[in-house]
Image: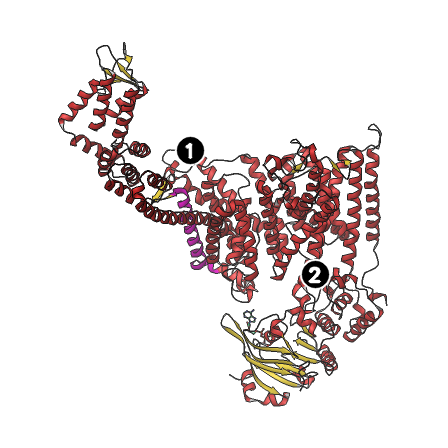
């Protein structure tokens, strides 16, 4: 009785999508190689293109994380930018410690901004960040704990829907205000920059950039498989059930709080990882990353691509950011109109996003 | 005001005996003599209390007093040269500045101070009282007593009383000193506190009395501080109230989440700018541009709201998350449109004269008038909103539609129209909030972003759907914010309030004033 | 007598803003018993189920299942005790297939990690197939629940209830909107289920209740009005007054 098979056989669209995805990933993997070709070679790809693609890959990871929470569990978080930024700050702290005596003030331990602000000792929460594994751990751990606390409080008291969205927005807003303060010990307004090296490799070297690019790409692929595994498991179906009829799920004996907490914390940790990959590539992190606008912009990537489909989320991150790069160079004034228009158009006309458009055409 | 001043001048002039005028002229002549003569003359003029002496002495101190070879004194001012004795216009040919030395300067300073205390100009009297307070000399006591007896402006009276108390503190006579201590004990200012502390070191004999005075002074200061904090909190709360009130209608009553709400506030502020620009140059209209801006802002934001609801939001009813994203996009578009139309830099809205300045409440509490107006305005808007919902036909239909759309429709209510009007109403209130905000904040395209999260917090804290909850929520959040500020700093106070709110929602998920009935579930 | 598996309500009141939806209601359902609860609209039947399943907290009174105090537990814990519920308004998961709906309901560890590791065994699949057979949904296994007819949704929900393998089933108006034939089928299904488990059925339809042929409790304005076999209850003057006269 083939009718009882839960997942329908892969359709031609699905197969086509899979093939296209693999092709795109291979093309992406080729980019740093093409970058090494002589500048006048026909297939040469400029540094700019490689570095901006590296950024977009990090954004795509963030989009996957948001999609996991929103598209599958119905948790519209307007604060995922905060998790991304916290991951970035964690790795930024590591990069700051690695500058060592090469800072402007030449202090052997303290970063420049601390010397400037008159610190004499390293604050306790900066301890250990000279170790890369520790920093990487914190890039996952801190967003995870924050999501755990916020999520626990919110889910336990059954804060759902827009209320949850507003609370997460307030969370990132509060963090932004806090990180803008000098006395928080995170460089205030200016954040961290002027990084020198990572894992013994100079950050501005071509090889390092290529390594970061591949690390991001590998993380993107890994995250995709992780998310795909989760969403295809029974937990994925529980999440969908939670998304569509939360209270009914409770009467089946599932703890909605646990399910949501699991996915929210995991999603926050993935976002933290994306931020940790992002910061060494762009060379700066400051409190602006916490601004509520960033988080909601990331949500629209997912909406544009098609929420509830993992490929769609990544596709949305790439396409919206490509459009942003293009528009902000040719007509900067228009970009905000276009972005605002995207919000309106996607919600009203394309509720299933670009991928939904593809599917709709087929059926 | 001018009439009152005029009366005072008349009274002063009439009360001056005839020989005093001679005394003025007599003494004036001395200013043309040697340094010793000049100093004596200055002292006599100061003691005489004749208002005409003040400009002459000022001119002498500034080097603008001229002497013609025939010893006639002239005053040089921006407007021209006048004769010192008569005030008639004069010719400065051959005149030379009158020179003075330090001794004369000291005498002049004292005389000018004394004269200024009884000057017909209130600002001058206030400045003089301040100056006397700072010099603190027992010699000034009689002078201050005389001036105080004559003074009618409360604020200046208080200043003079403080100066008098300060002068008494340094008197030789212990009884007089005690009078000074008693007066300072009630003053309730940091300045008075410093004076008392100084006096305790200087006169150990009065130590116990001064300590007692300090205790009661501190109590007065504490009460005043608390009142000030409360006022600041209420002021912030009223701003929150205004920003949240429209949201309480669109989100609280209708259940539509509108992230462009802050932009409607911003539109209201820009409407104020436009109305003000239009009124500029029409003298009789200018002071009223702000009251005129209120209906203008209501209409502009209300119209924008109606368009948003009919054009877009209506298609997303029942899909709150999509509505949230969509309206966020609309907010971005509005911001960018305003930025392109009006420029990204801040626009200044000038407060009309009747709104400016500070007001002194009994007990020496200083309140800025424009903030007071905002408080009053927010309460009026709240009252009007409640009245509109409770007592009008529109309010009745609105409640009917939000409570049971289907039944309302079967009773012949055009629900679509009611939706649009309700949304326009809430948006219009946001516009009016913009008028108020233009008085205390920079008018810029992103004016609204700072308020939107706070507004949602207020509505959720107060209880969605309850206007009374919005009032209590806004005011208490404002006050708590200001209470925390001295301890945590403005930013951390805000963070603390946000965290506190999240914990509060744990205990009361439906806010302070939960909606009742099944619909709330 | 053992209290195991026995549903025990004593003096339960639920007050909404001063309105007593349940008023000092007492009710005992023994293990394996099937009980029909009838009563006019607004009598408090659904509210009673809300109280048992933890959706609504009683204002006062005792609610026990076996030794467990249900007033202190949340919905999921109560469900895991073995109390299953079918809602008055059928709620199934539209974005999942019939098979997946049943799979979710199947009795199995409920934690997130357990769900992540869950593998559909042959045994589980056989059980799902069996329930689909019983509820007549076999042909629709791969269809999204969203496209089912109203009656099929009702059955799917009953099927989900069976998958949970509960000790106590609460069934709220299972035949509302069903054809006569479907109603009969449902009655037969419920009779079959009973015996192994306790069942509380809320229904308006007196014919259906008669078809069940069990003890009946009549609820009115939040209190029990009458209790007994259907014929006795139908002749109770108070019941007649409530249902017919005024
Ligand atoms: N959450 C609630 N808030 C207010 N009143 C309620 C709520 N739930 C139920 N009621 C009222 O309690 C009464 C009983 O309702 P219900 O249990 O649904 O009756 P029925 O016997 O028809 O299932 C009704 O009058 C209903 O309006
Ligand atoms: Mg019912």
**Range covered by the magenta-colored residues:** B367-396
Where B413 falls versus B332 (above or below)?
Answer: below
Counting from the top left corner in percent of width and height, residue C23 is at 53, 78
Q: Quadrant of residue A53?
A: top right
Verify whether residue A175 appears in magenta: no
Question: Looking at the image, which is closer to me, B40 or B8?
Answer: B40
**Label 1 neighbourhood size at 10 Å, few (<14), some (14-19), many (20+)?**
some
Q: Kindly tell me whether mark 2's CB lies below 8 Å from ligand 1.
A: no
* Residue bearing the label numbered 1: B280
Q: Quadrant of residue B507?
A: bottom right
Q: Secondary structure at mark 2?
A: helix
Where B476 falls versus B5 (above or below)?
Answer: below
Residue C58 vs residue A347: left or right?
left
Counting from the top left corner in percent of width and height, residue C180 is at 70, 79
Q: Residue at x 68, y 55 (%)?
A: A264
Residue A77 vs residue B451: left or right?
right
Residue C23 vs residue B63: left or right?
right
Where C166 falls versus A7 (above or below)?
Answer: below
Question: Looking at the image, which is closer to me, C49 or A113?
Answer: A113
User: What's the mark number on residue A259?
Assistant: 2
Quadrant showing the N terminus of chain A: bottom right
Q: Secondary structure at mark 1?
A: loop
Counting from the top left corner in percent of width and height, residue B399 is at 50, 60
Residue A276 vs residue B436: left or right?
right
């Amino acid at each position: 009785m083939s009718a009882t098979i839960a997942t329908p056989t892969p359709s031609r669209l699905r197969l086509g999508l899979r093939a296209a995805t693999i092709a795109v990933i291979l093309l992406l993997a080729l980019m740093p190689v093409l970058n090494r070709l002589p500048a006048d070679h026909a297939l040469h790809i400029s540094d700019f293109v490689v570095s901006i693609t590296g950024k977009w890959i990090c954004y795509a990871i963030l989009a996957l994380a948001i999609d996991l929470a929103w598209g599958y569990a119905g948790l519209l978080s307007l604060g995922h930018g905060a998790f991304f930024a916290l991951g970035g700050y964690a790795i930024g702290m590591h990069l700051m410690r690695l500058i060592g005596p090469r800072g402007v003030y030449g202090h052997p331990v303290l970063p420049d901004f601390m010397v400037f602000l008159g610190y004499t000792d390293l604050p306790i929460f900066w301890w250990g960040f000279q170790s890369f594994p520790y920093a990487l751990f914190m890039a996952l751990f801190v967003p995870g704990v924050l999501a755990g606390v916020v999520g626990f409080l919110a889910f336990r008291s059954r804060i759902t829907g827009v209320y949850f969205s507003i609370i997460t927005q307030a969370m990132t807003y509060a963090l932004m205000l806090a990180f803008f303060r000098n006395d928080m010990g995170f460089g205030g307004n200016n954040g961290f920059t002027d990084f020198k090296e990572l894992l013994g490799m100079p950050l501005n070297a071509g090889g390092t950039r290529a390594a970061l690019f591949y690390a991001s790409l590998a993380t993107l692929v890994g995250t995709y498989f992780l998310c795909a595994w989760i969403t295809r498991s029974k937990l994925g179906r529980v999440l969908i059930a939670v998304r569509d009829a939360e209270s009914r799920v409770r009467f089946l004996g599932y703890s909605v709080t646990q399910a949501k907490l699991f996915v929210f914390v995991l999603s926050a940790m993935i976002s933290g990882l994306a931020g940790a990959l992002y910061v060494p590539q762009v060379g700066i992190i400051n409190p602006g990353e916490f601004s509520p606008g960033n988080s909601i912009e990331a949500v629209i990537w997912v909406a544009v691509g098609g929420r509830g489909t993992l490929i769609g989320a990544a596709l949305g991150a790439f396409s919206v950011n490509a459009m942003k790069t293009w528009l902000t160079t040719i007509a900067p004034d228009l970009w905000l109109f276009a972005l605002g228009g995207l919000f309106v158009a996607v919600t009203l006309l394309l509720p299933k996003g670009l991928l939904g458009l593809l599917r709709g055409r087929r059926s | 005001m001018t009439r009152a001043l005029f009366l005072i001048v008349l009274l002063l002039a009439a009360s001056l005996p005839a020989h005093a005028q001679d005394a003025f002229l007599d003494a004036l002549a001395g200013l043309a003599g040697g340094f010793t003569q000049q100093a004596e003359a200055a002292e006599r003029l100061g003691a005489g209390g004749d208002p005409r002496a003040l400009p002459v002495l000022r001119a002498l101190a500034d080097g603008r007093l001229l002497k013609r070879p025939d010893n006639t004194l002239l005053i040089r001012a921006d407007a021209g040269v006048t004769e010192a004795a008569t005030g008639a216009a004069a010719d400065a040919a051959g005149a030379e500045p009158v020179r003075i030395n330090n001794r004369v300067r000291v005498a002049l300073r004292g005389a000018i101070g004394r004269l200024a205390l009884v000057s017909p100009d209130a600002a001058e009297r206030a400045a003089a009282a301040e100056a006397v307070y700072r010099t603190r000399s027992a010699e000034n006591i009689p002078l201050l007593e005389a001036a105080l007896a004559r003074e009618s402006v409360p604020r200046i009276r208080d200043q003079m009383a403080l100066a008098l108390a300060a002068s008494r503190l340094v008197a030789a006579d212990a009884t007089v000193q005690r009078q000074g201590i008693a007066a300072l004990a009630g003053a309730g200012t940091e300045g008075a506190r410093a004076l008392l502390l100084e006096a305790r070191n200087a006169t150990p004999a009065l130590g116990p009395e001064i300590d007692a005075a300090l205790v009661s002074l501190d109590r007065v200061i504490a009460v005043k501080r608390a009142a000030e904090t409360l006022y600041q909190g209420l002021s912030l709360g009223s701003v929150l109230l205004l920003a949240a009130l429209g949201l309480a209608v669109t989100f609280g009553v209708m259940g539509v989440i509108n992230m462009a709400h802050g932009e409607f506030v911003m539109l209201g502020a820009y409407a104020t700018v436009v109305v003000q620009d239009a009124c500029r140059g029409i003298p009789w209209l200018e002071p009223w541009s702000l009251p005129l801006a209120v209906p203008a802002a209501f209409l502009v934001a209300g119209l924008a709201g109606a368009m948003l609801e009919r054009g877009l939001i209506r298609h997303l009813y029942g899909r709150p998350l999509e509505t949230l994203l969509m309206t966020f996009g609309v907010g971005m578009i509005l911001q960018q449109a305003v930025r392109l139309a009006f420029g990204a830099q801040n626009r200044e809205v000038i407060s009309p004269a009747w709104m400016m300045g500070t007001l002194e409440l009994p007990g020496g509490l200083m309140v800025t008038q424009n903030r007071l107006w905002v408080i009053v305005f927010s309460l009026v808007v709240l009252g009007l909103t409640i009245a509109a919902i409770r007592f009008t036909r529109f309010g009745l239909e609105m409640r009917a539609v939000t409570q049971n759309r289907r039944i309302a429709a079967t009773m012949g209510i055009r629900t679509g129209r009611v939706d649009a009007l309700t949304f326009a109403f809430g948006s219009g209130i946001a516009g009016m909030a913009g008028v108020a905000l233009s008085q205390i904040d920079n008018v810029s395209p992103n004016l609204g972003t700072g308020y939107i999260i706070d507004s949602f917090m207020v509505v959720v804290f107060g209880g969605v759907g309850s206007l009374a909850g919005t009032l209590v929520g806004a005011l208490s959040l404002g006050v708590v914010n200001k209470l925390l500020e001295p301890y945590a700093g403005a930013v951390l106070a805000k963070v603390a309030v946000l965290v506190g709110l999240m914990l509060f929602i744990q205990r009361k998920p439906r806010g302070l004033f939960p909606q009742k009935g099944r619909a709330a579930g | 007598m053992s209290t195991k598996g026995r549903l025990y309500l004593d003096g339960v009141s639920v007050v909404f803003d001063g309105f007593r939806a349940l008023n000092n209601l007492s009710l005992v359902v023994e293990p394996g018993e099937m009980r029909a609860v009838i009563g006019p609209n607004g009598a408090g039947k659904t509210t009673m189920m809300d109280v048992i399943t933890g959706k609504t907290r009683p204002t006062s009174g005792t609610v026990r299942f076996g030794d467990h105090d249900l007033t202190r537990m949340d919905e999921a814990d109560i469900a895991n005790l073995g109390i299953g519920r079918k809602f008055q308004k059928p709620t199934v998961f539209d974005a999942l297939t019939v098979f997946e709906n049943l799979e979710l309901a199947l009795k199995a560890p409920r934690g997130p990690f357990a769900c992540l590791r869950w593998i559909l065994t042959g045994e589980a699949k056989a059980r799902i197939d069996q329930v689909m057979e019983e509820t007549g949904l076999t042909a629709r296994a791969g269809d999204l629940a969203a496209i089912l007819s109203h009656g099929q949704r009702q059955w799917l929900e009953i099927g989900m209830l069976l998958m949970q393998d509960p000790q106590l089933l609460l069934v709220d108006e299972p035949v509302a909107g069903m054809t006569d034939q479907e109603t009969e089928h449902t009655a037969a299904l419920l009779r079959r289920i009973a015996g192994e488990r306790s069942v509380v059925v809320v229904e308006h339809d007196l014919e259906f209740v008669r078809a069940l042929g069990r003890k009946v409790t009549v609820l009115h304005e939040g209190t029990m009005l009458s209790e007994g076999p259907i014929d006795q209850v139908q002749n109770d003057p108070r019941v007649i007054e409530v249902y017919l006269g005024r």
